[in-house]
C-alpha cells in the first residue's frame, strides 16, 4: 500500500475512534474488552460516515481538492487527539461490569472464554476466506461496478459530478451518496482508481458488524450472549458473499445494528450517558445516507422513540445526532431530486390491483421461506442459524430486565417495521415480482437479520446464568 492509500484509509478510522472516545457513549460500563471492541467498531462506521460527509460537502462547494480534504481531516484528528489526551489525564473511573447474582465454579466460569475462543478462531477462518474472495474478484458484483463505484468515479470530477445522479446513466440516481462519496474520496486522495479502496471499505464494514454485535451484546447481557450471537452470525451464509460484493447492504446492516444497540446501551446506562442517544441518532442518519431503506428506518425509529413519550431533553439528544448526519441526504433529495424506480409508470389503479392480488402474497411468502432456509453455510442442519437459535430457546430461560423494556420496544418496532416495509415494496413493485424477489430478497434479509439476532440474544441469561446452567446448579432467572 502506498503512503497516500494508507493515510486515506487510516484517517477516517482514527477520526471515528477519537470521536466515540471523546464523546463516549459508554462511560465506565464494562467489561472493558467489550467496551473497547464496541468503540473501535462504532468508530469505524462513524468515521467513514464523517469522511464521506466532509467529501460531499467540499464537492458541492466546489473545493474538492486533496489538500482541502487532508487539511480538514488532519485538523479534526489533531483537535480530537488533544481532547482525548486531556480526558485521559483526568481522574480515571472504575469499570462497571454486568452484575452476577452468584459466583459459579471455576469450570463453569470458563464457558464464556471457551465460546469467545471458538468465535475468534471461526472469525479468523472466515475472514481469511473473505480476503481470498475479494482478491479473486476485486471489482465486486454488478451493483458495485455499475452503481456504487461508477457513481464514485463521477464524484471524483469536480466539474461533472452531477452526472452521478442523472437518470440517463441508469446508476439508480435516487440512491444516497454516502458510500460512493467515501470511495470517491479515497480515489481522489490517491489520484487513481485502485480497486483496493472499495475492497477495504467492504472488509471494514464486515468486521465492524461483528464488533458491534459481539461487543454490544457483551455490554448489554454478557460475554456468553455476545459470543453466541457472533457464532450464529458467522453461520449465516449470505454474509460472506455479499461482503465481497461491495454493495450497500452490509454497511446498512451496520448502521441499523449500531442504532438499535446504542438504544439498548442507553437503557443499560440508565440515561447517565447522553452520548449514547446522540450516536444512535447519528447512526440512523448515516443509514439514511447509505441506501433508501435507511430513510424508512429513520422514520420508524423516530416515531417509535416519540411514542414512548421521552422527556424533551432526551428527544433533543437523539435529534442532535440525527440532524447533522441526515442533512446531506435531505440536501440531495431536495436539490438533486431523482425519480424513484418504485413509482415509475405506476398508477393508483395498478397499485390497488397488485394489493388485491393474492398470488403476489404467496410468491413473496415462498421467497421469504426459501431465503430463510438458505441462510446456513451447509444447508438446513445443526449449523443453520435458525436451528442454533431454536436450540438456545429450548435450553435456556429468557431473561427479563425492566430497564430495557422501552428501548427493546423501539428496537423491535424498528426491526418488524423494516420487514413490513420490504413486504410492502414487493407487493406494489412495478418490476417483475419473481425477478425482483430473486435479485434482492436475500440482501434485504441480510440488512435486518443482525438486528433480529441481537434482539433474540438480548433475552439470553447473563454470564452467571449460563454458568449456573452448565454447572447444573440451577436454572437461570
Image: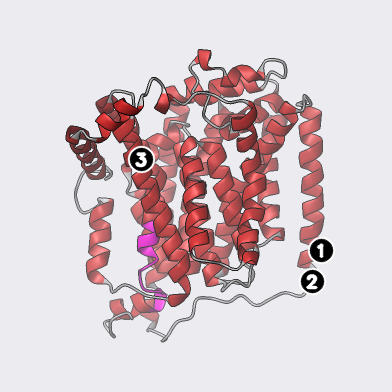
Contact check, label 1 and label 2, Cβ < 8 Å: yes
Left/right placement of residue 363 relative to residue 62 reads left
Let me know if residue 456 is in the magenta part: yes
Residues rendered magenta in the picture: 453-464
Q: Is residue 143 above or below residue 49?
A: above
Q: Are marks 3 and 2 in contact (CB under 8 Å)?
A: no
Q: Which mark is residue 86?
A: 1
Is residue 398 positioned above or below 121 on the image? below
Among all residues in the image, which is located at the extreme front? 349
Place of residue 347 in the rendered image (x, y in percent of width and height, measured from the top left) = 36, 24
Q: Which residue is mark 3?
A: 422
> In percent of the image, x 64 and y 23: which residue is there?
155
Residue 446's x, y, as percent?
Answer: 38, 43
Within 10 angstroms of label 1, few (less than 14), some, or many (20 or more) residues? few
What is the C-alpha distance between the residues marked 3 and 2?
48 Å
Question: Which residue is at 37% across, 75% downward?
Answer: 400
Can the viewer see residue 137?
Answer: no
Nearest to the eye among marks 3 and 2: give it: 3
**Distance of mark 1 from mark 3, alpha carbons?**
47 Å
Q: Quadrant of the C terminus?
A: bottom left
Residue 70, by quadrant, is top right
> Which residue is rendered at x = 26% and y = 66% of the image?
393
The image position of residue 411, as x and y in percent, is: 44, 58
Q: Nearer the viewer, mark 1 or mark 3?
A: 3
- Looking at the image, is mark 3 or mark 2 earlier in the sequence? 2
Residue 278 in the image, given as x and y percentages of width and height = 63, 57
The answer to whether 364 appears left or right of 60 in the picture is: left
231 to the left or right of 70 = left
Amino acid at each position: 500500500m502506498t503512503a497516500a492509500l494508507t493515510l486515506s484509509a487510516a484517517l477516517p478510522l482514527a477520526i471515528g475512534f477519537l470521536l466515540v472516545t471523546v464523546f463516549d457513549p459508554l462511560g465506565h460500563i464494562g467489561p472493558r474488552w467489550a467496551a473497547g471492541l464496541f468503540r473501535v467498531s462504532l468508530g469505524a462506521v462513524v468515521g467513514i460516515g464523517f469522511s464521506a460527509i466532509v467529501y460531499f460537502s467540499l464537492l458541492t462547494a466546489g473545493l474538492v481538492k486533496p489538500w482541502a480534504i487532508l487539511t480538514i481531516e488532519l485538523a479534526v484528528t489533531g483537535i480530537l487527539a488533544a481532547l482525548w489526551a486531556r480526558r485521559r489525564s483526568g481522574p480515571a473511573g472504575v469499570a462497571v461490569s454486568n452484575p452476577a447474582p452468584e459466583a459459579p465454579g471455576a469450570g463453569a466460569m470458563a464457558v464464556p472464554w471457551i465460546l469467545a475462543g471458538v468465535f475468534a478462531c471461526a472469525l479468523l477462518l472466515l475472514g481469511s476466506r473473505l480476503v481470498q474472495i475479494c482478491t479473486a474478484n476485486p471489482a465486486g458484483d454488478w451493483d458495485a461496478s455499475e452503481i456504487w463505484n461508477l457513481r464514485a468515479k463521477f464524484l471524483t470530477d469536480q466539474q461533472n459530478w452531477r452526472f452521478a445522479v442523472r437518470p440517463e446513466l441508469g446508476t439508480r440516481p435516487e440512491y444516497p451518496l454516502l458510500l460512493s462519496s467515501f470511495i470517491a474520496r479515497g480515489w481522489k486522495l490517491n489520484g487513481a482508481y485502485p480497486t483496493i479502496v472499495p475492497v477495504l471499505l467492504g472488509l471494514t464494514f464486515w468486521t465492524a458488524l461483528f464488533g458491534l454485535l459481539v461487543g454490544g451484546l457483551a455490554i448489554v447481557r454478557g460475554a456468553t450472549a455476545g459470543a453466541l450471537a457472533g457464532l450464529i452470525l458467522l453461520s449465516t451464509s449470505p454474509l460472506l458473499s455479499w461482503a465481497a460484493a461491495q454493495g450497500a447492504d452490509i454497511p446498512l446492516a451496520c448502521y441499523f445494528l449500531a442504532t438499535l444497540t446504542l438504544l439498548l446501551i442507553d437503557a443499560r446506562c440508565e440515561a447517565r450517558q447522553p452520548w449514547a442517544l446522540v450516536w444512535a441518532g447519528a447512526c440512523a442518519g448515516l443509514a439514511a445516507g447509505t441506501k433508501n431503506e435507511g430513510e424508512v428506518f429513520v422514520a420508524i425509529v423516530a416515531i417509535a422513540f416519540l411514542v414512548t413519550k421521552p422527556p424533551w431533553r432526551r428527544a433533543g439528544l437523539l435529534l442532535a445526532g440525527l440532524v447533522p448526519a441526515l442533512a446531506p441526504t435531505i440536501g440531495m433529495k431536495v436539490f438533486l431530486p431523482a425519480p424513484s424506480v418504485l413509482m415509475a409508470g405506476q398508477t393508483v389503479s395498478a397499485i390497488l390491483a397488485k394489493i388485491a392480488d393474492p398470488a403476489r402474497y404467496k410468491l413473496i411468502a415462498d421467497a421469504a421461506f426459501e431465503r430463510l432456509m438458505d441462510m446456513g453455510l451447509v444447508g438446513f442442519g445443526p449449523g443453520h442459524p435458525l436451528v442454533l437459535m431454536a436450540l438456545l430457546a429450548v435450553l435456556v430461560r429468557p431473561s427479563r430486565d425492566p430497564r430495557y423494556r422501552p428501548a427493546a420496544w423501539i428496537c423491535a418496532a424498528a426491526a418488524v417495521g423494516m420487514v413490513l416495509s420490504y413486504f410492502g415494496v414487493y407487493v406494489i413493485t412495478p418490476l417483475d415480482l419473481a425477478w425482483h424477489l430473486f435479485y434482492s430478497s436475500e440482501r434485504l434479509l441480510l440488512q435486518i437479520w443482525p438486528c433480529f439476532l441481537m434482539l433474540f440474544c438480548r433475552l439470553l441469561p447473563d454470564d452467571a446464568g449460563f454458568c449456573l446452567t452448565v454447572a447444573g446448579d440451577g436454572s437461570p432467572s
